[in-house]
């Protein structure tokens, strides 16, 4: 079985997310998504609209995703790859070269992002400044 891993926050799910998950899954048989926790996002000065648990539940409902695990630190990537017997590490092309150190452990693939869509653009278009709106 060929195992693939990718990372992200996956907030405000959109077609770009689906495209990268589909293309990542096409590179193997089993796709693990490592999802940034709310605490890790805070370290990155990033605020997701949906909580970690909600984002995890949404990802688990997508047919391309076989398993979702938490991302707690930048440094966990090598152990994630080794501990999960990963064959292919996938990230968007905007991260090109940043994870080449993983080539000692698995194949590293940078996939093109879907043009014209991003969570940042959605938040900007909706006037969401990263703060959760109260009901």
Image (cartoon, rainbow, N blue to C red):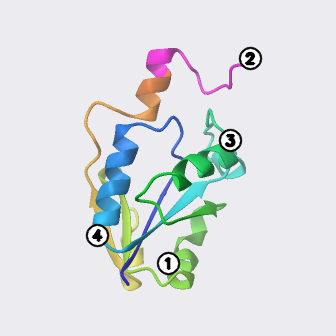
Q: Check disc 4 and report the residue beneath it.
A: 27
The reply to whether the magenta stretch includes residue 110 is no
Q: Of callouts 3 and 1, which one flags the residue occurring earlier in the amino acid sequence? A: 3
Q: Check disc 2 and report the residue beneath it.
A: 135
Q: Residue at x 57, y 56 (%)?
A: 35
In the displayed structure, 58 sits above or below 73; it is above
In the displayed structure, 41 sits above or below 71; it is above
Which segment is the magenta one? 124-135
Q: Gap between marks 3 and 1, in whole Å? A: 25 Å
Please count the marks in the image. 4
Mark in the foreground, 4 or 1:
4
Q: Of callouts 2 and 1, which one flags the residue occurring earlier in the amino acid sequence? A: 1
Q: Of callouts 3 and 2, which one flags the residue occurring earlier in the amino acid sequence? A: 3
Which of the 4 image quarters holds residue 97?
bottom left
Q: Gap between marks 2 and 1, in whole Å? A: 40 Å
Q: Of callouts 3 and 4, which one flags the residue occurring earlier in the amino acid sequence? A: 4
Q: Gap between marks 4 and 1, in whole Å? A: 15 Å
Mark 4 secondary-structure assignment: loop
Q: Check disc 3 and report the residue beneath it.
A: 51
Mark in the foreground, 2 or 1:
2
């Amino acid at each position: 079985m060929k195992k693939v891993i990718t990372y992200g926050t996956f907030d405000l799910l959109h077609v770009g997310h689906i495209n990268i998950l589909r293309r990542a899954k096409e590179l193997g048989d089993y796709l693990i998504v490592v999802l940034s926790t709310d605490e890790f996002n805070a370290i990155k000065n990033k605020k997701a609209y949906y909580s970690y648990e909600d984002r995890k539940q949404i990802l688990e409902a997508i047919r391309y995703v076989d398993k979702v695990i938490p991302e707690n630190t930048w440094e966990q990537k090598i152990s994630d790859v080794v501990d999960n017997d990963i064959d292919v590490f996938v990230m968007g092309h905007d991260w090109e070269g940043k994870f080449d150190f993983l080539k000692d452990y698995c194949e590293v693939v940078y996939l093109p992002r879907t043009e014209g869509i991003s969570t940042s653009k959605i938040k900007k278009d909706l006037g969401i400044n990263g703060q959760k709106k109260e009901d």
